[in-house]
Image (cartoon, rainbow, N blue to C red):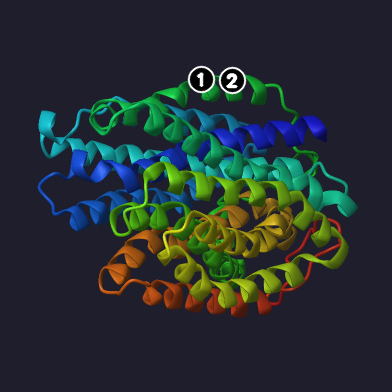
Amino acid sequence: MPRLATASLAGTAIEFYDFFVYGTAAALVLGPLFFPTFSPLAGTLAAFATFGVGFVARPLGSVLFGHIGDRRGRRPVLVASLLLTGASTVAVGCLPTYDRIGVTAPLLLLVLRFLQGLGLGGEWGGAVLLTAEHAPADRRGLWSSFPQVGPAVGFVLANGVVLVLSATLTEAQFAAWGWRVPFWAAGVPAVLGLWLRSSLPESPRFLELGDHARVPLAEVVRDHWRLVLLTAGGLAVGYAIFYAVTTWSLAYATERLGVSRTVMLTCIMGAVVVKGALTPVAAMLGDRFGRRPLCLVGCAAAALWMLPMVALLSTGAPLAMFLGFLGALLAFVTMFGVIAAYLPELYEPRVRCTGAAVGYNLGGVLGGALTPIVATALAEHSGRVPWGVGAYLTVIALVSLGCFALLPETRPVRLPAVQPVLE
């Protein structure tokens, strides 16, 4: 289990590094470089729109790689998804900008972002299932939480690289070539990750299956559509919180409040480090008290904290902003610390890779793809404090609370052979 958990954590860290480094670049520099004919606001919105394309691609990736995972095994998914995401990320760093090739530049950026999302859509399902299906039932939450720590590690690595570059390069140097370095750097860990994952054993649950689904997506749509919609709706608030903190607030504070890029990255990274460290703690609580109660508590806390968070952000004071981000990510980790165990337990083994991954990544479309765009538009028409953004996030939290309230508890049962909810 330690070997499997470490390999899963390393893989998700690498893939989410690729995904997050794009979000940071979109907030800071991609607008002027790839959409220079737009106004500053429109350029930021356009960059965030390409950011959102990655989320749209993620459910498609979960369908593609979920089919492979349910038909051929979980392990091939880990290798193929990592290769796709790593290659497309390095390619972003090699793209000519608008002033070199004109409109072809943003079009190529859009295609590469789509491929990034496609690969990441397969990554989560494969990594989580390989860990969850090996884990003992009474510690499934704890072991399954290791892939969930990977996003925090990937985020810190991505923003750490950008932070170092921001502190050592001038604005002109960063715009000219410095922004490319984090994308080029993705190639090294991707190669190491491929080597690490090539020797992992296949999931025993998959090997025990005598009858594999011929078309997993068709079975999921036919038999488990309600479960997919509820899980996607429940997870939407987690994505909305995370990308409001890590992407929208970065652009808002640097452009509207005049906070330095270095200060913002430091505040956000500090909150994400705490979030990552507490993920196994939330998972252990889920093993003891259940998955659903923690999801409900996390949603309720998010609904109560979103307005205070934007108020603290609007001060521009580093400590206040850090506390606002920390409160939001504590609500986030209360939910997402148990999700890696909860989703596999909700779906039957023959369609588990497709069902769990589609629900997870569809939640990303609902909460993650739209949040930076909507929040940027709402903040533009707000005063000093963007109350509209806080209200928007609060509504998402309440919707997610309702979705989790309609889902069943699964702990401490063994991974079920049949669907546990009434359709």
Q: Position of residue 266 (x, y in %)?
A: 50, 44
Q: Answer with the quarter of the image where residue 8 lies.
A: top right
* Label 2 secondary element: helix
Towards the viewer: 318 or 56: 318
Residue 38 visible in the snapshot: yes
Q: Quadrant of the N terminus?
A: top right
Q: Position of residue 92 (x, y in %)?
A: 32, 31
Label annotation for residue 192: 2
Towards the viewer: 416 or 30: 30
Distance (Cα) linking label 1 and label 2 = 7 Å
Residue position marked by numbered label 1 in the rendering:
188
Asked if 343 appears above or below 60 in the picture, the reply is below
Q: Position of residue 122 (x, y in %)?
A: 54, 43
Instruction: Residue type at mark 1: give it.
Output: Val
- Name the residue located 49 percent from the left edge and 75 percent from the top edge: 307
Q: Answer with the quarter of the image where residue 39 lies.
A: bottom left
Asked if 94 appears above or below 136 in the picture, the reply is above
Pointers 1 and 2 in contact (CB under 8 A)? yes
How many discs appear? 2
Q: Residues within 10 Å of mark 1 (few under 14, many from 20)?
A: few
Q: Position of residue 52 (x, y in %)?
A: 36, 53
